[in-house]
Image (spheres, rainbow, N blue to C red):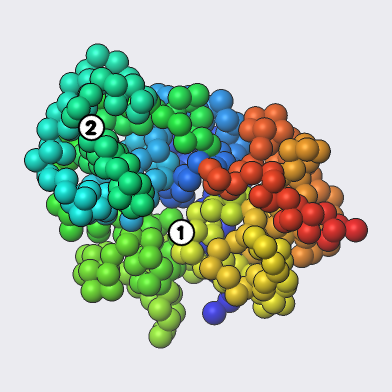
Amino acid sequence: MNEAKLRAWWSYRQGLDGRLSRESASSVLAQTGWARSVGGVGPYLTLFARAGIGREAADAAAGGLQIYELPSARGCTYVVPAPDFALALKVAQEFGGGEMKTAEKLGVTEREIAKLCEGVIAALEKSALEPEELRDALGSKVRNLGAEGKKKGLTTTLPVALGKLQVEGEIRRVPTNGRLDQQRYRYTRWRPGPLKNCKLSTEQAHTELARRFFGWIGPATLAEFQWFSGLGAKASKATVEPLKLEAIEKDSDRLLMPGDREAWESFRVPREPQYVLVSGLDGLVLLRRDHKTLLEPEDRKRKVMLEKNTGELGAISDLPSHAIVDRGRIVGLWEYDPSTESIAWLSFVAKNTALKKAVERTEEFVRSDLGDARSFSLDSPKSRAPRIAALRASQK
């Protein structure tokens, strides 16, 4: 297997070669994959790295329901393009019962939640409301689950109802400040909801998810799709069968959509570098959740700063920082330092002019559009200070 070609192909399919520079936010996500959202800047960096889309344009696309943050694969939240709203909610449904199971252990019944859902919908008919406002409007319909509920991470019954209504497409969360990199919301009715005319069965939805997955990041393994989808091994195998996937080469477990065979065979690795700074949760890295294949062997053993100590880059499950990539290869790590309004970065390759310009471009974007580059909601300048310091030290 030509690893350089494989990495460059993934980068090409992910639109990290500049070919999507004139595309809309919805088109970018449709072509390259849903953007994982955990209260960080991942979705913004996804759109900026591929199409130069700024925060205001991304927020406008979300405000206009061209893209939106929804429960989706594995029940996790992703920013999804409008044509995939129904699919995302459909595949999320079987993973959306976790809070209900917890509530049942605390004596809550499905009938109680059904009544609460009716109350939520009635309250939201008038206007969008924040959770505290909803609790006030619903009164005794929301039950406090006491100390035992607090231990289990469920203080009232309201989150159960809100989660259920979201995956059913009856309501949606609206960021209170309109931004994708925060986790404070109000809730509003969704009329008509995306699932209103959805005819997909659960099995068909899984197959459509697989079709997109292998189009976004194939050639990929069945195990990688299994992780992304949350399905079991047997279900994953049955799900992809209608796609007639092909092994990239004899005896390989990497599978390709049949329609991509000709493009793959004719693809050549670009001669010139294509440096781009991406989120640590970028689709190039996260869809297959295997950043090790994007590293050269010598870089897999590189010691980097984790949360509290150092570790080998190739021995951990997820990247500790955002990444710098070149034709699919991870060639560096970076973090944003708000105190100096600059990017701290480590390069695994020589720092040439093109690489420095790529860093400067993203630095300006984060400074002017975002203000910070949190990986997730609980990330902060203080928590990432050791990583920033280690990256700064590597520059000397």
Q: Quadrant of the N terminus?
A: bottom right
Q: Find the residue positioned furthest to the front.
A: 147
- Image-based side of 281 in relation to 78, left or right: right
- Image-based side of 292 in relation to 147, left or right: right
Q: Find the residue positioned furthest to the top.
A: 126
Find residue 105 and report its horizontal and vertical position in percent.
Answer: 20, 54
Find residue 160 and report its horizontal and vertical position in percent.
Answer: 25, 41
Give the residue type that dot 1 points to.
Leu
Front residue of 319 and 58: 319
The vertical placement of 222 against 87, above or below, is below
Q: Quadrant of the C terminus?
A: bottom right
Give the residue type that dot 2 points to.
Val
Give me the disc on residue 169: none
Going 60% across and 67% down the picture, which residue do you hit?
A: 294
Q: Which residue is mark 1?
A: 287
Residue 261: tell me if it is visible.
no
Q: CA distance from mark 1 to mark 2?
A: 38 Å
- Element under label 2? loop
- Image-based side of 104 in relation to 11, left or right: left
Whichever of labels 1 and 2 marks the residue nearer the N terminus, that label is: 2
Q: Find the residue positioned furthest to the right.
A: 396
The vertical placement of 306 against 301, above or below, is above
Of marks 1 and 2, the one in the foreground? 2
Q: How many marks?
A: 2
Going 27% across and 49% down the picture, which residue do you hit?
A: 99
Going 51% across and 30% down the picture, which residue do you hit?
A: 179
Q: Which residue is mark 2?
A: 142
Front residue of 136 and 197: 136
Residue 396: tell me if it is visible.
yes
